[in-house]
Each structure stands twice: as structure tokens, then as C-alpha cells.
Amino acid sequence: MVAAVWFSLRMPGGIFTDKTTFIAVDGPHDAYVQNGLVYLKMADVRSVQRESDFDFLNTGSPHYVAFVGRRKGYQYRQ
């Protein structure tokens, strides 16, 4: 979701300027961008599955969360 919010803000013509609300599979989401960071409010997390290098969160829709030391130069999986 964070990537989608950032993409929507940065695309030519932009879909929004600083705040947005949208509906996803797991319900309504509110987001805003401040100082280059995306802040996202979504449904409460129903369960968390912790693994060695990622977390799997369930909000009614699955979310794969990986914590990386640096974003710049990070090789994202396809």
C-alpha cells in the first residue's frame, strides 16, 4: 500500500497532493505524505506470523513486511 500511495503522489499529474483515502480488499485506508515519508492508517492487524527475515500480517488481506537497513540500493523481489 505504501508503494501505491507513493506512486499515486509522484505520477505525472498526481492523483492527490498530500492526503488521500481509498478502499482496498481489507477496508478503508487513509494516507498522507509528509517530508518524503508515507503515513498509512489501515485495518487492525488480526494476526502476525514472525519469520527470521520478515513478518506476515493479516488485516483481512495478507501483508508481507520485510525490514531492511537501507532502501537505497535494496534489490526488491519481483
Image (cartoon, rainbow, N blue to C red):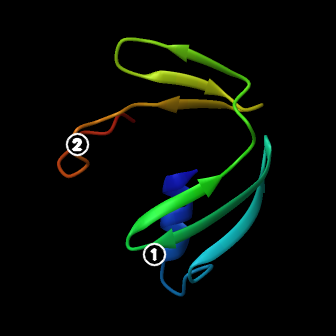
- Residue 46, located in which quarter of the rendered image? top right
Residue identified by numbered label 1: 10
In three-dimensional space, the C-alpha distance between marks 1 and 2, rounded to whole angstroms, equals 20 Å
Residue type at the position of mark 2: Tyr
Which percent across, then down, holds residue 60?
77, 31
- Residue 29, located in which quarter of the rendered image? bottom right
Instruction: Using the image, tell me which numbered label, if any, was put on residue 74.
Output: 2
Which residue shows up at 46% across the image and 73% down it? 34
Which percent across, then down, holds residue 65?
47, 32
**Residue 68 as seen in the image, left or right of residue 47:** left
Residue type at the position of mark 1: Arg
Is 26 placed above or below 23 here?
A: above
Which residue shows up at 72% across the image and 32% down it? 59
- Mark 2 burial class by Cα count in 10 Å: few <14, some 14-19, many 20+: few
Secondary structure of residue under mark 2:
loop
Which residue shows up at 48% across the image and 83% down it? 12
Which percent across, then down, holds residue 69?
22, 38
**Residue 50 as seen in the image, left or right of residue 48:** left
- Mark 1 burial class by Cα count in 10 Å: few <14, some 14-19, many 20+: few
Is 39 placed above or below 25 here?
A: below
